[in-house]
Image (cartoon, rainbow, N blue to C red):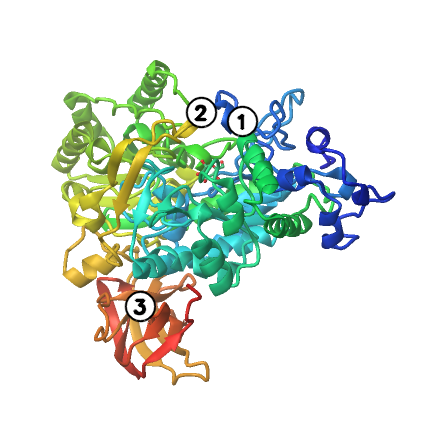
Amino acid sequence: MNRTLATAALLATALVAAPSPSARAADPPQLGKSSVRDVIAAMTREEKVGLVMGTGLNVPGLSLPPDMQAPVVGVTASGVPGAAGTTLAIPRLGIPAIVVADGPAGLRIQPTRKGEEGRTYYCTAFPVATALASSWDLDLVERVGRAMGNEVREYGVDVLLGPALNIHRNPLGGRNFEYYSEDPLVAGRMAAAMVRGVQSQGVGTSIKHYAANNHEWNRDTIDVKVSARALREIYLRGFEIAVREGGPWTVMSSYNKINGTYTSQSPALLQGVLRDDWKFDGLVMTDWFGGRDPVAQMTAGNELLMPGTGRQRRELLAALESGALKEDVLDRNVERVLALVRRTPAFHHAAHGDHPDLKAHAEEARQAAAEGMVLLRNQGALPLRAPAKVALFGNSAYSTIIGGTGSGDVNEAYVVSLAQGLKDAGFVVDGALADAYPPYIKEAEGKRPPMPMPFLLPPPIAEMTVSADEISRLAREADLALVSIGRNSGEFRDRTLENDFDLSSAEKSLLQAVASAVHAQNKKLVVVLNVGGVIETASWRDQADAILLAWQPGQEAGHAIADVLVGRTPPSGKLATTFPVRWADVPSSAGFPGKTLLGPDPNARGPFAGDRAAEVAYDDDIWVGYRHFATRGVTPAYPFGFGMSYSTFGYSDLKLSAPASDKSMTASVTVTNTGKVPGREIVQMYVSAPGQSMPKPALELKGFAKTRLLAPGASQVLTLTLSPRDLASFDAASSSWKVEAGTYTVKIGASSADLRQSATFTRAAEILDRSSR
Ligand code: BGC
């Protein structure tokens, strides 16, 4: 398929005013052949302004107010239907349009195209980021990235709008499923691995949403009030790791403000931190319609405004005219857009076949899903042995939730439900339930009111009621009961405490009724959590003989869950986010999600029309997740890093190396499978700092590794590295990273609450990386 799009060319022609006489040379310079300086010199102002913004958004069903419409009304070019945006092509200068598309769990494009009946463009729905992070397996995430990147390239897209790595600050964050962890090291390393995987295919990524976009409520207006230390150590640190270790082609700024300034308009964030401190050399794009002032965005170093609007175009042209926007600032940004364009398949006229190996990628998705599942409880119920008759309860057992909604959604070819996965693994699912659930769900879906906007999360369907008599019959006739609890969430809305974080009363009654019926028959109840984020478990977990946290596992859901239930893939995932006993135990819950300020936001428009001026104080500061629970002795339901296996593991021989010349050191530890079946163990390295000159958490994760599949009795030595920067905290007064003097303890273990080996070392005080801001 030819990537030089007729529509984009049309748009280019429409946008281009007559070039200046000097630019009207016989052979205009060509990108890649002539110097960039010459190419820019040959551009009209209109072309330059056209290049620093996308060509608009065209979502069927979404009507935008006039000022949010495309730069040239009526033309919203995209070479790939369903992609999120396109940049301007200027064919006379050899500049092609590039295509960007979501998102974190797989490529999101339209699966069918008008006039191409019989052809499809399905993408693989991989497990959501929360699930991938729970694998703690960077090689696996890189492999998933390679498969995802291959689809991006095969379908003619240039930049994938992912991975997303905001911190899980609160369980109710509506997009937590798209993000990895409450811990910046896990989030940053996962994102870096994903970036490396995707970009190995010759396409780009956009790590998002930079930064402190931790919930959805008033996301387009909210002002996050956060200390410099928490910002650097918690909310920016993951991005820093992803930039340094992954090298993403682009970064997407977020919707929110930080301490009064929109992130996309913040020179401190985009120039100071990102480019000066971290040496980022790629491009920054806005989130879709993010920020308010295009001139401030250009000046701050947000080079690309997405998806691009007519208002932005008019304002930038007027600002150039008045001098409010300097031509050299615009030129710098144009140069960075061109640098991105030059990296893309579009620029290299790369052929693409539209035929990714979806079968191989489905296998990858299945393996990744299984590796990310977390066994939370097992009182001798698992592994299961087929054949067995399963009484399978719960809407999500039949209509399994494979990923969240909004831009994090994927148009996959099929979904393997839990019911199907169990059948394929040789189990018999009770026929009466299997016959009742699907029509109940279909009917309830049909009754839902149409959603006012595309990709909004539809209201959940109430759990189907199963009579007490039926439950008794099933308890007698089936070999075991399995209840699936499902949750979905997505863009624009946070989750709720009632009926979401907490189980609904229908779910509680179902669990209770099934538990007492099967236990009366000396049979077991297994609960599968088909959720994208954290839910309450402490009040009901004792009723279950086993709990498998399957997350939202992607399109191979049912197969992957069955793989873990029978031990074909032994469970090895661990939590990358704490499960608290109560929502209120999470420190950010106190002020969540923030407060509205006086009056509606006069600028809230289009998809954000409901947004009010709002702010949220991050009073939890650096005490996010286990940093809070471990330091303040608050017992969670399941601690950070927790996850069971069908086997057990012993830890021995922790050895710290002497500091190397760069003062980094290594910790090595031997892990032995002490159980009876094969398994993999995730080893976590925490450090306790002296905490004399500044408050420090009791523990901070500084490294992790996962063993290979160890046979019973087999051992593996794992070696983890600790650099001086890992020991440092951000000191706001001097704007630098400080290592305090004193004795540090390295603690290695199976979770943040199960530390097995420790060793100490001392360090002298040190100042590192003094920041430009
Ligand atoms: C989301 C981004 C996404 C963009 C394009 C926005 O609403 O916040 O994550 O990449 O849309 O679809």
Q: Look at discs 1 and 3 and give the one toward the viewer.
A: 3
What's the residue type where badge 1 is placed?
Gln
Q: CA distance from mark 3 to mark 2?
A: 46 Å
Residue at the image point whose x is 16% and y is 26% from the top: 472
Q: Nearer the viewer, residue 45 or 539?
A: 45
Q: Nearer the viewer, residue 432 or 212?
A: 212
Q: How many numbered discs? A: 3
Task: Please name the residue that numbered disc 1 is placed on.
Answer: 69
Residue 703: x %, y % from top left = 37, 67
Q: CA distance from mark 2 to mark 1?
A: 17 Å
Q: Look at discs 2 and 1 and give the one toward the viewer.
A: 1
- The quadrant holding residue 639 is bottom left
Mark 3–mark 2 contact, CB under 8 Å? no
Q: Which badge, 3 or 2, comes first in the chain's sequence?
A: 2
Residue 578: x %, y % from top left = 25, 52
Q: CA distance from mark 1 to mark 3?
A: 44 Å
Mark 2–mark 1 contact, CB under 8 Å? no
- The quadrant holding residue 680 is bottom left
What's the residue type where badge 2 is placed?
Pro
Element on which disc 2 rests: loop
Task: Please name the residue that numbered disc 3 is placed on.
Answer: 733
Mark yes or no: residue 568 visible: no
Task: Please name the residue that numbered disc 2 is placed on.
Answer: 454
Dot 1 alpha-carbon crowd within 10 angstroms: few under 14, some 14 to 19, many 20 or more: many
What's the residue type where badge 3 is placed?
Ala
Residue 333: x %, y % from top left = 60, 49
Dot 3 alpha-carbon crowd within 10 angstroms: few under 14, some 14 to 19, many 20 or more: few
Mark yes or no: residue 67 visible: yes
User: Which image quadrant: the N terminus?
Assistant: top right
